[in-house]
Image (spheres, rainbow, N blue to C red):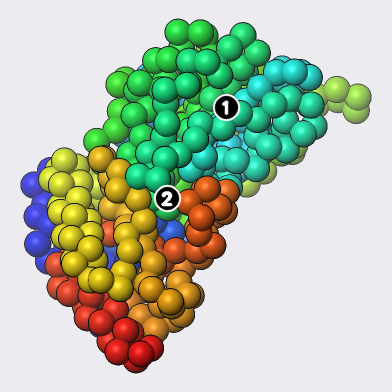
Amino acid sequence: MGVSLTGIKQLFPIFLDKPQLVFLDNASTTQKPASVIQTVTEFYQHENANIHRGLYELSSNATVRYEAARKKVKDFIGAKSEKEIAFTKGATESINIVANSFDSIVNEGDNIIISGMEHHANLIPWQQLCIRRKANLRVIPVNQQGELILDGLDLILDSKTKLLAVVHISNTLGTINPIQEIIAKAHQKNIPVLIDAVQSVGHCMFNLADADADFLVFSPHKMFGPMGTGVLFVKEKHHALMKPFNFGGGAIREVGIHETIFMDFPHSLEAGTPHVAGVLGLGAAIDFVNNFDLKESSDYTNRLNSTFREKLQAMNFVKVIGQPKKTGSIVPFIVDNIHPHDVAGFLAEHQIAVRAGHHCTQPLHEMLGLQATVRASFSIYNTFDDIDKIIEGLRELRKFWL
């Protein structure tokens, strides 16, 4: 702790290389600090070796560091044991692994519950599972404020519900969902819960001891770590349910021509050569985040969020989408009579990076009567000057379009 947010951009090489860049697409991916880049680079330059099966020094050291990163993840999210932490290719693969495992226990007439604001990664695997197993996909609706309507949740949670899967912070609306309340309701009926924590882990106060999720996924590249890595937390009581997703070396105890005995979770999911450098980079990203007071950094990005929302709402040609009571660092909006792609394209010409489209939440946009939105999302290296620049860019866009 103790590192100040002042001047933090200097820790990110991309902003030294591109000082004019206003990067407001952090919900898609965050930029990488020098410490993470250095960790990945130094592994390939000085430490490169495969893990777990080599008896020589490079391999032994790589194995120790790889497993140390697993413990860092365990401590960071408040899991009880590093045995509850599996490394994957990303949050999308993590969810697919869980859905693949539930295939064996979901039967015709059963149901899976999701919310209406889920990212496609937390919708399609359950949709396809329900299609395969002739089960029902139930949806918690979303109101026009961008909040989940939980009044009827008790009614749709029943003896046929096999799982509830819900996002913690919406990647489109920025809504912070009351996951503790949702999990408690599900657990009262012994229904397990999967939490998509992609937009929350590393950005706000979060601990599994408080949330008590059964499954949790997140992507390190959205919290300053490398792309191509993911985390899947599975509570120990569910380990026997988890089926290998990829088959191959590294995940087995014994192999015969006609039968294979697999290792226990999490190693049963880590067949083949893992993204060792990426996992080490994840460890470095956790170290980086741990240098800051997470409440302070979260409060800072929330101030950026509220300031930007206020400035947008003062512009009579811009509409902010949704007004959730609790929101993260994501702000969706539309500009009158200008397609979101045109808005994003114009801003890009001014070195302002935002995202436009349905943000992998097409059903949510349809519920809100929209085809697409512009999304600005903030991180700790953004500044109030960045807000001034995008506001000025929107004013210039309006003049240009008239």
Report the front residue among 172 and 192. Answer: 172
* Residue occupied by mark 2: 171
Compared with 298, 349 (above or below) is: below
Left or right, 221 with respect to 6, comes to right
Give the label on residue 103, or none. none
Looking at the image, the residue that sits furthest to the right is: 258
Query: Quarter of the image holding residue 41?
Result: bottom left
Residue 132: x %, y % from top left: 80, 32
Question: Up-down: is 169 above or below 155?
Answer: below
User: Who's the residue at 35% across and 50% down the image?
Assistant: 322
> What's the residue type where badge 1 is placed?
Ile
Q: In the figure, is residue 11 to the left or right of 116? A: left
Q: Residues within 10 Å of mark 2 (few under 14, many from 20)?
A: many
Where is residue 311 drawn, in percent x and y?
18, 66
Amino acid carrying mark 2 in the image: Asn
Report the Cα–Cα distance between label 1 and label 2. 19 Å
- Tell me the residue at 45%/8% (across/down): 188
Location of residue 28 by image quarter: bottom left
At mark 1, the secondary structure is: strand
Quarter location, residue 212? top left
- Front-most of residues 334 and 381: 334
Query: In the rendered view of the protein, which quadrant contains the N terminus?
Result: top left
Could one spot residue 125 in this view of the protein? yes
| Left or right: residue 352 compared with residue 386 | right
Q: Identify the residue position indicated by label 1 in the image.
A: 113
For marks 1 and 2, give the one nearer the viewer.
1
Report x, y in % for residue 243.
Answer: 69, 26
Q: Residue at x 56, y 32 (%)?
A: 139
Q: Is residue 37 visible?
A: no
Q: Is residue 78 above or below residue 379?
A: above
Q: Residue at x 34, y 23 (%)?
A: 180
